[in-house]
Image: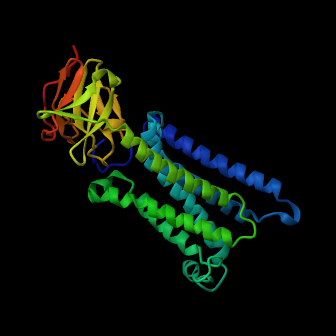
């Protein structure tokens, strides 16, 4: 829960998450290989290495599509929030699957000649002036390098060392995705039989793009309109806030504030930005008396925005007042870690 340079400590939930991911990976590979071997027999049979290569390729592409869909789905419906838990583990697992596919491809197509296999990938034949003959391998290699950097920096150590640059680095998942789309698209043009990859490609692009667009529109429609009253802004009725959950409001140009209801009759307002990786605190909930970030479980006390000892993270807090069941917010933030009177519902 804090920047401590120690090995990852797996708890029961993390083990279940990782187990589900890898059971799914193994099941997919087994089913893909079995169906392919049944479908293509005799003279039409496919070399086992190529079958595995395709299995890991489609599995990795499917995993990346799911990873990119988790964020917008969680913003559209809170029931998807559990999928955010340890999403970095999902990303590292995806990289391992992609690495196996790349290793098989390099071994099978680039390891039996006099040229270094990696050099062969970069200099392999192709026509840069032809869409149907474009050397798609280069896109795959660049995408793999992007995902390697992301997987290698997924530990909290790198988040602490890189600071605010960490999040910017991991936004590279989108350029990496586009490189992978180009790799799959150009590669499919050069295959006599492309299998399910073209369908997966179109479905993935439509799904990822559509969900991100819809979630952006959904968030803008769901944003609460605030009415300014002197130095306070009117948020709405406290009954609209589910116990141990929050609503998120925007004040000013960019500031977002999470207003939590907890212990059934208490209200607090804090910054919506977690100090760990800028996670959306308003999408989390109050667990064991602490506001808990939905991304990685960082916690803050509602009364002062401080992480419970021995942790030292702090977030900005805000003042609230209640008039005739209507919640009002003072939009001026208090310094991070500032205690203020608890607003009680009477």
Q: Nearer the viewer, residue 297 or 13?
A: 297
Residue 256 placement (x, y as % from top left):
26, 42
Residue 89 makes an appearance in the image? no
- Answer left or right for 267 relative to 201: left
From what the image shows, is residue 245 above or below residue 153?
above
Q: Is residue 120 visible?
A: yes
**Where residue 157 appears, x then y in whole percent?**
32, 54
Lateral position of residue 302 relative to residue 231, left or right: right
Name the spot of residue 52 as percent of width and height, x first: 68, 60
Quick check: 114 above or below 31? Answer: below
Q: Nearer the viewer, residue 324 or 309?
A: 324
Picture quadrant where residue 55 is located = bottom right
Placement of the N terminus among the 4 image quadrants? top left
| Residue found 30% across the figure and 51% down from its top | 5
Residue 290 placement: quadrant:
top left
Q: Is residue 192 left or right of residue 326?
A: right
Residue under the image location 50 percent in, 64 percent down: 178
The image position of residue 262, as x and y in percent, is 29, 23
How many circles with numbers are drawn on the protein? 0
Q: Residue furthest right?
A: 42
In the foreground, 244 or 215: 215
Split into 4 quadrants, where in the image is the C terminus? top left
The residue located at (51%, 43%) in the rendering is: 18
């Amino acid at each position: 829960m804090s920047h401590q340079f120690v090995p990852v400590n797996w708890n029961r939930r993390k083990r279940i998450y990782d187990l589900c991911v890898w059971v799914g990976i193994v099941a997919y590979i087994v089913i893909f290989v079995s169906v392919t071997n049944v479908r293509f027999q005799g003279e039409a049979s496919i070399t086992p290495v190529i079958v595995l290569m395709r299995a890991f390729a489609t599995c990795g592409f499917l995993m990346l599509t799911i990873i990119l869909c988790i964020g917008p789905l969680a913003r559209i419906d809170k029931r998807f929030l559990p999928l955010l838990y340890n999403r970095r583990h999902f990303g590292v697992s995806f990289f391992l699957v992609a690495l196996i596919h790349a290793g098989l491809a390099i071994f099978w197509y680039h390891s039996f000649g006099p040229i270094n296999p990696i050099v062969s990938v970069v200099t392999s034949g192709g026509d840069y002036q032809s869409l149907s003959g474009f050397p798609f391998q280069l896109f795959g290699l660049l995408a793999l390098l992007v995902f390697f950097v992301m997987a290698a920096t997924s530990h909290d150590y790198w988040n602490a060392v890189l600071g605010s640059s960490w999040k910017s680095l991991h936004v590279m998942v989108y350029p990496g995705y586009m490189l992978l789309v180009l790799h799959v698209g150009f590669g499919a043009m050069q295959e006599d039989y492309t299998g399910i990859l073209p369908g997966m490609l179109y479905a993935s692009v439509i799904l990822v793009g559509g969900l991100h667009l819809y979630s952006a529109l959904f968030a803008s429609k769901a944003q609460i309109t605030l009415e300014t009253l002197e130095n306070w802004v009117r948020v709405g009725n406290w009954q609209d806030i589910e116990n141990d959950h929050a609503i998120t409001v925007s004040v000013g140009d960019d500031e977002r504030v999470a207003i939590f209801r907890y212990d059934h009759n208490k209200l607090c307002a804090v910054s919506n930005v977690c100090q760990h990786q800028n996670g959306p605190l308003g999408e989390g909930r109050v667990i064991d008396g602490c506001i808990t970030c939905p991304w990685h479980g960082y916690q803050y006390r509602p009364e002062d925005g401080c992480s419970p000892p021995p942790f030292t993270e702090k977030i900005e807090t805000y003042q609230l007042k209640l008039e005739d069941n209507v919640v009002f917010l003072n939009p001026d933030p208090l310094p991070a870690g500032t205690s203020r009177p608890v607003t009680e519902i009477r």
